[in-house]
Image (spheres, rainbow, N blue to C red):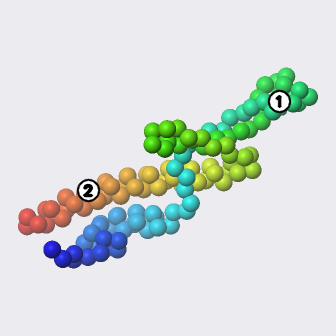
């Protein structure tokens, strides 16, 4: 059977108006990092620092993610925490958009099936 349309182009046939809106948002997505970011505080280890007395005060950050069931971790230098936070936030946004697209396409499939019967 010949393909009637190309799957990578959004049309009125292969998705709904809402689906096309979601695809536009997906197309504009920036760099993302599928990981979770943990920011904690630590002691620096210098005896003269006030953290030796007062407890951990130095921000430290890690990203963790799973690779073939194994948890991996990577240290994030303080200067990059803000930027990496953005990447991880973009990943959350992408996941949300992807779930919305799934709901929309399932709904669209129901519509297409209905039209087949008419
Ligand atoms: Zn310190």
The percent position of residue 45, horizontal first and vertical second, equals 82, 30
Mark 1–mark 2 distance (CA, rounded to whole Å)? 55 Å
Quarter of the C terminus within the rendering: bottom left
Please name the residue shown 85% across and 22% down the image.
53
Q: Is residue 82 left or right of residue 17?
A: right
Disc assigned to residue 106: 2
Please name the residue shown 37% across and 52% down the image.
99
Task: Pick out the residue farthest to the left.
Answer: 118
Q: Is residue 39 left or right of residue 58?
A: left
The percent position of residue 11, horizontal first and vertical second, equals 30, 74
Would you place residue 14 above or below residue 45 in this image? below
Q: Which residue is mark 1?
A: 45
Q: Is residue 89 visible?
A: no
Please name the residue shown 35% across and 58% down the image.
101
SS of the residue under disc 2 = helix
Task: Pick out the residue farthest to the right.
Answer: 48
Question: Reading the chain from its start, which is encountered first: label 1 or label 2?
Answer: 1
Q: Residues within 10 Å of mark 1 (few under 14, many from 20)?
A: few
The percent position of residue 109, horizontal first and vertical second, equals 22, 60
Q: Is residue 103 visible?
A: yes
The picture quadrant where one finds residue 26 is bottom left
- Look at the numbered discs 1 and 2 and tell me whether their residues touch, using CB distance below 8 Å: no
């Amino acid at each position: 059977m010949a393909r009637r349309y190309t799957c990578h182009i959004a049309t009125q046939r292969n998705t709904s108006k809402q689906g096309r809106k979601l695809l536009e948002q997906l197309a504009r997505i920036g760099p993302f990092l599928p990981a979770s970011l943990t920011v904690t505080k630590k002691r620096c280890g210098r005896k003269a620092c006030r953290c030796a007395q007062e407890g951990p005060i130095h921000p430290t950050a890690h990203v963790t993610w799973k690779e073939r069931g194994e948890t991996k971790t990577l240290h994030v230098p303080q200067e990059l925490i803000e930027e990496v936070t953005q990447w991880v936030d973009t990943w959350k946004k992408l996941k949300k958009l992807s779930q919305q697209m799934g709901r929309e396409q399932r709904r669209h499939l129901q519509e297409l099936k209905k039209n087949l019967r008419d």
